[in-house]
Image: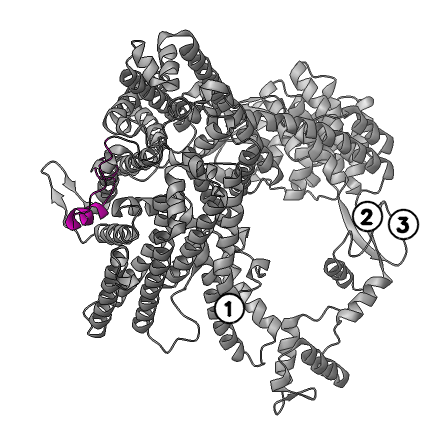
Amino acid sequence: MRPLLQPRHRSMLVFLAGLAIFTIGVTIAAQFGLVSTSFVKTLGKTLCLCLAALAMDLIWGYAGILSLGHMAFFALGGYMIGMWLMYARTEEIVIASLMNSGLPATPEEVQQGIATQIFGVVGASDLPAIWGFAHSLPLQLMLVLAVPGVLALVFGWLAFRSRVTGVYLSILTQAMTLALALYLFQNDSGLRGNNGLSGLQNIPGMDAVGQETISLWFFWASALALGVVYVLLHAIVAGKFGSVIRAIRDDEARVRFLGYSVESYKLFVFTLTAVITAFAGALYYPQAGIINPAELAPIASIYLAVWVAIGGRGRLYGAVIGAAVVSLLSSWFTGGRVPSIPLGFATINWVDWWQVLLGLTFVAVTLFAPKGIGGVFDRLTGVHTPDRKGAPLGPDDGSLQEREAQQ
Amino acid sequence: MRLIALLLAFLFSSMSAPVLAQQAAQIVAENRDQIEKPSRQTIGPVITALAESGDPMADDILAAWEAKRLVIRKADGAMFISAPDGAGFTLTALDGAAAGTATKGEIVELKPNAGVRGLISTALVQFTLSDPDPVKRQAALDSIAKDPKAEALTPLRASIAGETDATLKAQKERLERLLTLRFDPDSAARVAAIDSFGADLGLDLRGALNPILATTIVAATEPPAANIDRTLRVGRDVDPVAAYEILVAAGLAPARLTLDVQRDALIANLKDGMVGGVALADLDSRAARDRAYTALEDQGAVPFAATDDEAAAALAAYQFYEVYTETDPAVTAAAKAALDAIGTKVGVMQTADLALDGLSLASIYFLAAIGLAITFGVMGVINMAHGEFITIGAYTGYVVQLYITDYTASIIVALPLAFAITFAAGVAMERLVIRHLYKRPLETLLATFGISIALQQILKNVFGTQARPLTSPAWLDGAWVLNDVVSISYIRIAIFVLALVFLGFFLWLMKRTRLGLEVRAVTQNPTMAASMGINPDRINMLTFGLGSGIAGIAGVAIGLFAKVTSELGTDYIVQSFMTVVVGGVGNIWGTLAGATMIGGLQKVIEFFNPSNTLAAQTYMILFIILFIQVRPRGIIALRGRAAGD
């Protein structure tokens, strides 16, 4: 049998096939005007969220590190690409308006015009130093990966070096994203304070191309990215590296005594997932059109964990399914298109009560179905976890316990 | 001004040797023409004569004149003080005798202009300052203190000797010194007045001293004959752009060529696609535009304007001096020394104030975290819904106030009620969710987070998104003011006391009661505790309920000064976890130390960057992340068996 058709690769092939069919289907539907541009954008954004959830699954589901700060990397990636989008777009506008003023523009005038245009809203008229690379797309694309990557590297190194684990690490990552959000909320942070960056859906130099085409391009790019990253992560978790990080999840001390450098593995996974999340963010925000510091609020990262948990952690397709189902359901419920339920004494208006339903569902999933939606596939394919007759699966508090394994 | 000075000198000299009392009515009669058509230049002596007359009626006459109530009866030309009385006026003769009434048509009002009225009111100050009614004297003092004028000095001095009220006398003497140091013509007297204050912390003193030290920047080729503070070096003490603007303002240099002016001039001189010999298409750089402009200057087509080189040369040719507007060097030196001394003292006081602020913030954090210190610190259960318990407590206070309007009573009812409600919620949560997840802390975190978002949304649906009022009793309003720098509001003191009470309660509960003993036993080793006859399930339930209940009480306290919204608890949850983690899990003294450190440090950071509390929180969290590097187990780390591993 050829290696690719081995049973352990089957889920990946099924997933890729499904993704391809979905992408082609949406493209055809969009061509015939069956789905609106905004819905294509919603689907494209959802694919980006799935990508972030994949990363979250790698670090939480496989490596057992519950990071509550990964959406900070997502937003940072968005900010980095947003800086170029906003700069280049403003540059076009400024040059066009200076053309009409009688003299050809000097570089200083253009620079000044861009700065006033972008920063007038926070009362500044100079371009901050962090915008130094914003004029160049390649440099800024490099920053999309470099800034979150370096941040994750430094933060992870500090945290893992001092053996911060479990819930302490979760709280620490949550504090990190909160600190970053509070910092960006300031007007003098150099990223327009709580106004954030806007107008990102207008791609510079693409005015002739309509939004309906651009939205499809981004949809394809998101689908391609999701497929490529899925294959990459599948290769990682299916190989020896995957075995080591799963072992770290289940018994960190034992892996360390076997001679593995646990901290390096954790740091690598933390940084890799941060970079993937940032990449997802860089694809997401041009479709969303606007980014502001509220996107870094700790709650966003917790939702990421919620998606993975509901989808089923420890399996890559689970993360994708969870993110897609919950975020699409969420936008369906909060969009006000779900009929309210009259109860006689009160009416359940889903815009108000969806959050309650989500919270309680989440509690229920945690309590009764630790495998999430992924557990359904196990049941369908007849996969059962081995009955270990009560022997523990791992001594760590965070590892899978016997009761889960029986289900 | 000179006239006023003369007038004051006259007033002052005549104070010491009072002239024989003259009838006010007589003075008016003698100066009738001037009083009817007063001029600011010449009326001075008349007003002075009236003020000096010693006649009790002089006060009334001047007051009436100022208020445009001095009238002339048309019938006989006699002058009266009038008071509106229904449709007409009641008249009083100038010697105080009642003179019947008159209608509006029968009289003509004297309307002195604003300048004259100013002179009259100055003269009147001495009467109000010596008014028999202490309230009026106080009002007169306050008005002088609010708007200090040189003219007020003499009457103020005159009124001190006769002052009977000790408080007012002290106030008058202080005000006299404040006016002296600013307005006395005698330099020595001013220096003495400044020195007499020492390092007084009053804002009024700083308000009086600061104008003395006001400076202007003067450009000159050699030191001007003025009270010079210091010589400024361009680029170091004064910005070159600002310095050049001073030169331009003084007419010593031509205006600098701004980009906009240059641009407009170039566009205006555009001919056949060329400006000053440069093609239009080439004008896309500063250098090309400067070249074109210089060419235009040479042609005389545009006004001469300074380029950067010329500006630099002009700056080099001049010296810049910071010159006091106050001409007397002795006074400025004394004022500077006094302000320096005050500055040092203010610094010390500010440190004290900062310490108080930090302590009060620390007690808020401690209060928010003490419930967590039980559920997270002792039991090791991460409860992300802890913040919502705080919110529930605050909303309980709000609901109680809807039914009990007396604020004191409502708070007394709300505290135990909030405890009861959140205790019940905590017990329910422990029974239904948490006990199934004791071995899986990460799942506990997520499940309680699910509860948190559900609770928060339910609260939002019930109470709406706008802030609800939770009003503190009147006796908690106001602040304890130590001096102009150090003050602390009563509500913060109350929270501090409440935090201390909880600390005592926690210690008593854990160390002195059966429940505390059992809690400690169960958290250290549940199996062993169970075999000793303790029911771990029950203890866990009670402990969790207790921690939640304390969160409810903290919610009432926090709601008294924060906005009560459904997001109230969220604002404190991360800080609370930080407090417990930084302090050291499982130790109440650690939580106290953590709260003190976080609160104190946050205030210190805010002090250095007062406009920006967001940045303070950012740096605070960064600091905590780094602090965990140094002490991963917190300030007070448990050792040995109590540490649990």
- Do the residues under discs 3 and 1 have CB atoms within 8 angstroms? no
- Tag 3: Cα neighbours inside 10 Å, few (<14), some, or many (≥20)? few
The spot of residue B193 in percent (x, y) is 80, 27
Circles 2 and 3 on the same chain: yes
Which disc, if any, is residue B225?
Answer: 3
The spot of residue A262 in percent (x, y) is 47, 42
Instruction: Nearest to the eye among marks 3 and 1: give it.
Output: 1
Q: What chain does mark 3 sit on?
A: B
In the image shown, does B505 or B529 lie closer to the viewer?
A: B529
Location of mark 2 (residue) = B323
Q: Residue at x 35, y 76 (%)?
A: A209
The quadrant of the picture occupied by the N terminus of chain A is bottom left
Span of residues in magenta: A366-389
- Do the residues under discs 2 and 3 have CB atoms within 8 angstroms? no
Circles 3 and 1 on the same chain: no
In the image shown, does A268 or B608 lie closer to the viewer?
A: A268
Helix, strand or loop at disc 1? helix
Q: What chain does mark 1 sit on?
A: A
Corner quadrant of residue B36: top right
Instruction: Nearest to the eye among marks 2 and 3: give it.
Output: 2
Seen in the picture, residue B55 relative to B150 is either above or below; the reply is above
- Tag 1: Cα neighbours inside 10 Å, few (<14), some, or many (≥20)? few
Q: Residue furthest bottom?
A: B272
The quadrant of the picture occupied by the C terminus of chain A is top left
